[in-house]
Amino acid sequence: MAALSLALPDAHARTPERTATPAKAEESKAAPSDPTDEDTLLIGFAGPLSGPSAGVGKSMQNAVQLAVDEANRKGLRLAGKNYRLRLLAQDDRADPATAEYVARYLVSQHVLGVVGHWNSGASLAAAPIYHAAGVIQISPATMSRRFTAQAYPGVFRTIPNNDAVGQLSAEFAVRKLGVKTLATIDDRTPFGKGLAEQVARTARELGVEVTGSYSVSDKTSDFNGPLLQIRKRSPDLIFFGGLDWQAGLLAKAIRRLKIDSRLMGSAGTVGLPFLMQAGADADGALVLEPGPAADKMPGWKAFRQRYGQSFDTNVDLYATFAYDAAQALISGMRQSNATDGAAIAREMHKLKLAGVSGTIAFNEEGDLLHPSFTMYEVQDRRWAPVLQIDGAPRP
């Protein structure tokens, strides 16, 4: 049975499946044949299916496929006609330029909606293309505030934005850890930089001294420059705005340089890539992730069982949000009784769906109405939930 990927695997753990090119579609081999082309509606998935984040991408794709297969078994009748859904999955490599290409391809294939992308840079690059074509975009992982601030009526996400995550991360650091001094490092992406800036802003409001804010490339593996500056000031906490694999390298560098500072990473860090990169240096790292811990999610046990029956891979933390995103899109289709993107989007704004991760309901911008969060800590090279925070942060 599939399990949530929160612990470091042994040497014989299965390697995640890769895809070769972004234009190659992946479809479920187990899905029944489509009746006719005109009876088929395409749903797109876009995320990293190759590279260091392939594991999370494949797990999200599987979750969307599960939702599609379940909808097909239940049956989908819209405006008096029966339809079968088919998933068209694309590898954006977590790269904005590739994401643009993938978005144009999915639009050319007349997808009704897209679950994706994973990282904010990719989602922001693709969003104008989907918007111009009237294609719904619902992300299970994008946190940049800019994503929904564009006011596109067909844009949604099933996780909170990074303003909320940044604010609550800083509040936890001050109120629970007693942090007095803080430094930030970001990867210059809309997600990483925006999150680090929000953490620093909230920390200052709470009386914390921000001793420095540094930026690196989202491809770098060398953190010596900012860390040597940070070591001179020895802050209580280093916050990193960036992806999981880089955060793992940063954790190792902090210990190698004998910097006595706690590391707090960005949402999206909980999972295997960080643990595998950081090794023994992972212990003590903290990350605030969207949603409750898996065993606190109302639909987790049933979802894990169904996922495990269909796929022989681990359930990544973001798979539940991908499944809920697909369910929200399909529910919008059923509720609108239409195949028109604008009509479906209007109904999605009215949804109140009992999702795996909790209640899925959106505000006028497509953000979650009732977000929740969990703070995780690495203990003995395993991610452990230490605190759940329910509801939106203070205004």
Image (spheres, helix red, strand yellow):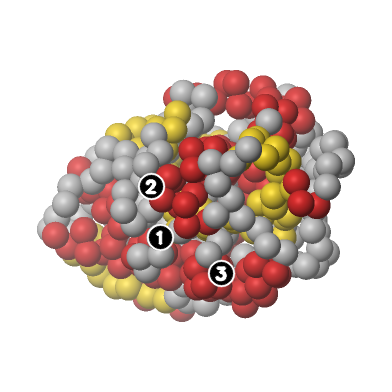
Amino acid at the residue labelled 3: Ala
Disc 1 designates what residue? Answer: 153
Tell me what residue is drawn at x 52 percent, y 24 percent. 299
Quadrant of residue 135 in the image? bottom right
Amino acid at the residue labelled 2: His
Disc 3 designates what residue? Answer: 133
Q: Which mark is residue 375?
A: none
Discs 1, 2 touching: Cβ within 8 Å: yes
- Cα separation, mark 1 vs mark 3, equals 12 Å
Q: Is residue 75 above or below residue 97?
A: above
Discs 2, 3 touching: Cβ within 8 Å: no
Q: What element carries label 3?
A: helix
Instruction: Give the class, few, some or many, for how many residues have Cα within 10 Å of label 3's Cα (few <14, many ≥20).
Output: some
Tell me what residue is drawn at x 85 percent, y 36 percent. 32
Where residue 228 sits: x, y (%)?
A: 42, 74
Where residue 41 sits: x, y (%)?
A: 69, 49
Q: Which mark is residue 349?
A: 2
Quadrant of residue 70 in the image? top right
Mark positioned earlier in the residue sequence (2 or 3):
3
Tell me what residue is drawn at x 78 percent, y 67 percent. 23
Front in this rendered view, residue 121 or 68: 68
Where residue 108 sits: x, y (%)?
A: 70, 69
Discs 1, 3 touching: Cβ within 8 Å: no
Instruction: Give the class, few, some or many, for how many residues have Cα within 10 Å of label 1's Cα (few <14, many ≥20).
Output: many
